[in-house]
Every structure is written in C-alpha cells, then in structure tokens.
Amino acid sequence: MQSLRQLVQSEKSRLHLAIALGATATFLMIWQCWLLATLCDLALHQQQIPTDLPLHILVLWLLRPLLLAAKDLLGLRASQAIRTSIRKQLVGIISSAGPLRQSIASDGDLSTRLLEQVDALDPYISRYVPQLYLVVLCPLAISVAVASQSLLAAMLLLATAPLIPVFMILLGKKAAEASQQQVQALGLLGGRFLEFLRGAATIRQLQAEPQVLNRLNNASEDYRKRTMSVLSKAFLSGAVLELFASLAIALVALYLGLGLLGELPWAKAEIPVSYQPALFILLMAPEFYAPLRQLGSDYHAKAQAEAAFASLAPIWALPVCAGGNVKAAIQPVTISFQQITLQGSEHRTALLTEIQAEVLPAQRIGIIGASGAGKTSLLESLLGFQQPNQGQIRIGEHLLTTLDLTQWRQQLVYLSQHSQWLSGSLRSNLLLAKPEATEQELHLVLQQALCTDFVFSLPMGLDTELAEAGIGLSGGQLQRLALARALLKQSWCWLLDEPASMLPPEQQQLYFQQLRLLTQGNTLLLATHHLAGLDWLDQVWLLQQGRIVAKGTVAEIQAHPLYQASYQVEGQ
C-alpha cells in the first residue's frame, strides 16, 4: 500500500519545477525590494533617479506574479494527474475485489470516498508539498539578504520564525482529529443517501417521504455542525499564526525604527542600520514570514488529506488476486481445494479453514451448513477475487491464481441470494448475459426458469421497467429471473448461493426439479440450508465454522447429527 508521500512521486518533476519557480520568485522579490529601497533613498535625499530604475521595478512587479501563477498551475496539473491516477487505481481494485468491497463499506460510502476523499487530496498535492520546500528555501534566502545588511535583524527573524511552526502543529492536531471525524460523517451520509435513492419507489409506495426527508435533514444538519466545528478550528489556528507573524514583524520594525532615531539602549546616538538597508529589511520582513504563514494555512490541507487517505487506505489493502495469463478451461474439469484458508475481519478470525476437497468434472455438489458456516465464502473463493491466506485452488491442471480471471469468470454462472439488477427493462437486464440473444431464446429461458407465469402477465411484458436493485418485483420473482439470465450464458460451471431462498416451499421444489434437468452434464456447487428435493445431488459437504466436517450422499448428511440439530432449530 502506498503512503501519502509516495503518491506525489509520479509527478515529482512538475512539483520540483513549481518549487523552482517559487524560489525564483523569492529572489526576484529580494531584488525588487532592494530597488524599491534604493528608489526611496534617492528620492529622500533628492538625488537623480536613473531612468531605467522604475522600469526594472515594473518588470519585476509583473514577472513575479507570473512565476507564482505558473507555480500554482503546475501544482494543480500535478494534483489533477495524481488524483486521476488514484481514482483509476481504486476503481480497478474495487472492480477486481467483487464482493470483497462490502467488507469495507457500502457502495454509497465507497462512491463518496472515490469522489470527495480523492478530491480532498488536492490542496495537499498542489499547495502543501511545494510549500514544504519553499518554507525552507525562501526564508533562508531572505535571511541571508537581511544578514548582509544587519546581522541582528536576521537573528531576530530567525529567532521568531520557529514560533509559527510550533503553534501550527499544536493547533493542527485538533484540526486533524476534526477532519478525520468529518470524513467518517461524510461517508455515512453518502451511504445513507444512496440507500434512500435505491429505495425511492418503495418509500413512495409506503408514503414514507416525510420520515425519510426528516432523517436526511437531521443527518445534513449534523454534518453542517461538524463542518463549522472544523472551520472554527482552522480559523482559530490561522488567527494565532497571523498574530505571531505580526508581532515578529513589529519587533523587527521597532528595532529598525529606534535605530534610525538613535534611541537603541545599547547604541545611543548611533544609527546601526541606515535608511536604505532598513527599508530594504522592512520590506522583506513580511515576505520572510509569508511562507511560514502559508504553510500554517496549508497544514490544515495536510490534516484533511491524511484523514482522506486513511479512508482510502482500506481499499488499497484489499487482498485482491491479480491472476495471470493462462486461459481457463471451457469444458468441465476437476476443481481441487488444497488446504484453503481464508482469513476474515477482526471480528471473525477465519472464513475458511484448511478446506480439502475435490469436485470431479460434471459433478453436482451440495454445500450445507448454518448461517456463517462458510458456504458463501467457499463459492466466492472460486471467483478468484481474494488471494487465499493459505493453500491453493486448482482448475484442471492450473492454479486459479495463474488464470486469466476475467476469462475464467466468463465461464462461470454465479447466482447469489440477491442478484444485481440495473434500472431498465426486463429485456435489457436479461440481455446482460447474452446481448445477441433472440426473442425465441428469451422465451425459452423464461419458460425453463418458471418465469412465464408472471412476466407475460405484466402490462408491458419483457419491456416492463425495473428500478435499480429490481424494485418492482418480489424477491422470488427476481431469483427466477436470475436463473433465466444465467441460462443464457450456457456455462459449464454453476455456483449457486441459496438461489431459491425467497420462494415458497412448493415453488422451491419446482425450481430444484428444473435445476436438476438444466445442470445435467455441468459442474454445480449449490449452497443451501436444506436438502429437501435435492436427492439428485452427487455429494454433499457439511460445513461448520469454515471447515468441512462431513462428506456424503444426501441421505448420509441428512442423518448427520449436526444437520439434524440445525434443521430442528430452524424448523422451530
């Protein structure tokens, strides 16, 4: 996983050029201040002013802002390039992670992170990183120029300079903590808003709009208060930094003014620094503290970026399997689980533990166990989204991790309890599996999946519009439609995770009878809670706490004490 500093390395040439432009602008400022002091000194003593002196001052006055603008533009270009690269990386990781992304946050929260939190890195990249170097180079150059005219004035500047970074850090810690809390609040608000959008049709049907709007208003008001709290801390620290900078400049001005009046306690009736050098020093004094004040302001950008980066770090840390270039088999082959172990989250020590099993070509396996036993994890391990912590999976003669995973997944039919549905017509959702499917093919798979009874009773038939997540149809109807869509794919390997859990018992029996006919000659792994109507399975694996504790026929597993105990509890 990358660090915040490593993110900027890809654009270091632009950022280094921006730093060089900023340093050059400082040298031009020193030159401009010297010329201004010379001009004022000549005017004070009523001496002749060289004709090219005002012209030089005007050129420097115009050139310096151009250099600073170019510096800012380079910083913005570097930030834009880095943020675009980060988004591509994160989108690629999330796409490769598949269901693993849910272990981090909801889709709404992830969307907020990809948009808001990646953009929160912009001030850090475009301003803070260049300023981190300029805060050393610029005051150092100015102090050398001041020391050439007055060593004591330079010492005063250098002695007071550390006060600003010290208070910047002390006050910045509070701002960093507030920024971290703000990032979390924004993620929760984004996730909640997305869930409300997805359920908009159901909310309207239940006439619950006032309650939902009230909850959104309360959440947004809480976020507003958090935002104002962060801003108040930022403004407070900014005011303190300005105060110390102003006091430091006043101290230098006091020394120079008393010196010109000959009223310094240790140098009565003496002028240690004459008018021209004194004015030169006084003109540069604000510029000496300007980079420090700017860094103090940009330090809050650093705190915000650190909070944003912390929210993005779990995405980079996902144990995604990259795969290889080996082409996957397009015909049934043996699938071997060889001591597979998958670690879970901090709240769950292991998803799977030392799974040792084999699926022969065209063998149909049932996977049964209580909720949380590891059935879904075992099926998802074949999708290749997560790198096993231990052991390996073989698909025929090749390791799963060496396969072209995109091509391998195209060979699979994976049905979860809640399949993905997009906003659009039934037809367009079915054609996701096979865009070139004909009308006859659609009617055939709908008939095979027991969908004709409700699809063609709809007013628009296949052209009926679905909302996102399939809102508009029942869970059982969507499960049957998911089977119809899977049949269009014509795969040799089927991974089904309780595909009929939302159907009533009578329809479940019909569903499994159809599944028996439709999967003949194909490899099938079926995760389920019950074995009723599944006596046609070749073998059943009984899972408990991520381990296979028994293998056998349907009758043998039904007689197993663990299955009977689980069935009795669920039956009650």
Image (cartoon, grey):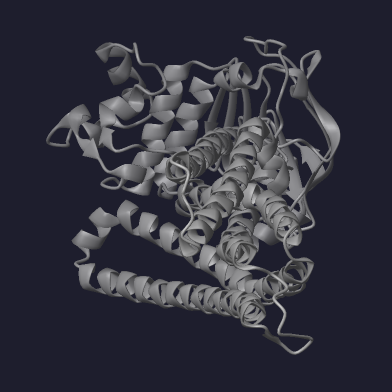
Above or below, 515 against 190 in this view is above
**Where does the image place residue 8, in percent across and percent down from the top left?**
66, 40
Q: Is residue 496 visible?
A: yes
Q: Residue furthest left?
A: 459
Above or below, 287 against 67 in this view is below
Q: How many marks?
A: 0
Residue shown at the point (81%, 32%) measured from the top left: 357
Q: Is residue 530 visible?
A: no
Which image quadrant for residue 318?
Answer: top right
Q: Nearer the viewer, residue 11 or 563?
A: 11
Residue shown at the point (52%, 68%) measured from the top left: 182
**Where does the image place residue 497, in percent across and percent down from the top left?**
57, 40
Q: Nearer the viewer, residue 513 or 50?
A: 50
In the picture provided, is 143 more to the left or to the right than 353? left
In the picture provided, is 242 more to the left or to the right than 227? right
Which image quadrant for residue 464?
Answer: top left
Q: Nearer the viewer, residue 475 or 237?
A: 237
**Where does the image place residue 153, in percent across and percent down from the top left?**
72, 70
Quarter of the image with the C terminus is bottom right
Above or below, 463 against 327 in this view is below
Quarter of the image with the N terminus is top right
Which image quadrant for residue 100?
Answer: top right
**Where does the image place residue 121, in percent across and percent down from the top left?**
56, 50
Q: Nearer the viewer, residue 399 or 211?
A: 211
